[in-house]
Amino acid sequence: MTLYFLIKYLHVLGAIVILGTGTGIAFFMLMAHSTNDVAFIARTASVVVIADAIFTLSAVILQAVTGGLLMMLSATSVAERWLLASLALYAIAGLFWIPVIFMQIEMRDLARKAAEQRGALPERYFVLFRRWFAFGFPGFGATMLILWLMIAKPF
């Protein structure tokens, strides 16, 4: 196995982790939210914050490092349109993902507090949840388009 293919494998693995973790996080948060069980929502949000920090963050870093190495090893120009589009979409995904991290942390904290007080979730939680849900579409959509661009290199 050449160094190029090892790095390409790690790059593809990073994409899988980003998409898989994103899908899993969204599913588990949605399922917990739909129960209206404050304690369950608090526990799930706690795990989601940890999963995003461990898996998504490490995969995002891996993508940047391996992508740069692949460019160098293959002599791919940053001026290639598919790559420029991928980089722009990577930035867009980041612009939606970074605020989501803080939303998840705040939703976790609000749910924990409500669970400790055996009370209802505050309106702020629901505002954040709707925003978190909405931010998922462009963030995840950008990631899906990047994957397609990496495979198809259409232009």
Image (spheres, rainbow, N blue to C red):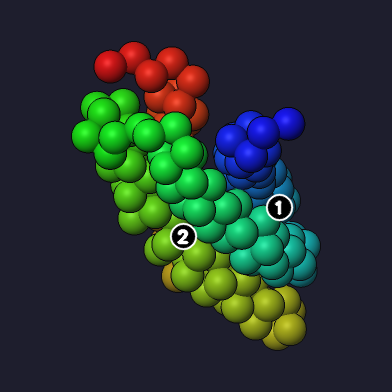
Residue 85 seen in this snapshot: no
Q: Nearer the viewer, mark 1 or mark 2?
A: 2
Mark 1 closeness class: few <14, some 14–19, many ≥20 residues within 10 Å: some
**83 left or right of 147?**
left
Q: Is residue 154 above or below residue 120?
A: above
Mark 2 closeness class: few <14, some 14–19, many ≥20 residues within 10 Å: many
**85 left or right of 31?**
left
Sequence-wise, which precedes: disc 1 or disc 2? 1
Q: Residue at x 59, y 35 (%)?
A: 4
Q: Is residue 111 above or below residue 15?
A: below
Which amino acid type is shown beneath numbered disc 1? Answer: Ala
| x, y percent for residue 18 | 59, 44
Q: Residue at x 67, y 56 (%)?
A: 55
- Number of labels in the image equals 2
| x, y percent for residue 41 | 70, 62
Which amino acid type is shown beneath numbered disc 2? Answer: Val
Name the element at disc 1: helix
- Per the image, the residue denoted by label 2 is 100
- Foreground pick, 22 / 63: 63
Q: Residue at x 65, y 82 (%)?
A: 113
Query: In the rendered image, which quarter is residue 36 located in?
Result: bottom right
Query: In the rendered image, which quarter is residue 120 located in?
Result: bottom right
Measure the C-alpha gap from mark 1 to mark 2.
17 Å
| x, y percent for residue 71 | 41, 39
- Foreground pick, 31 / 140: 140
- Per the image, the residue denoted by label 1 is 32
Quadrant housing the C terminus: top left
Quadrant housing the N terminus: top right
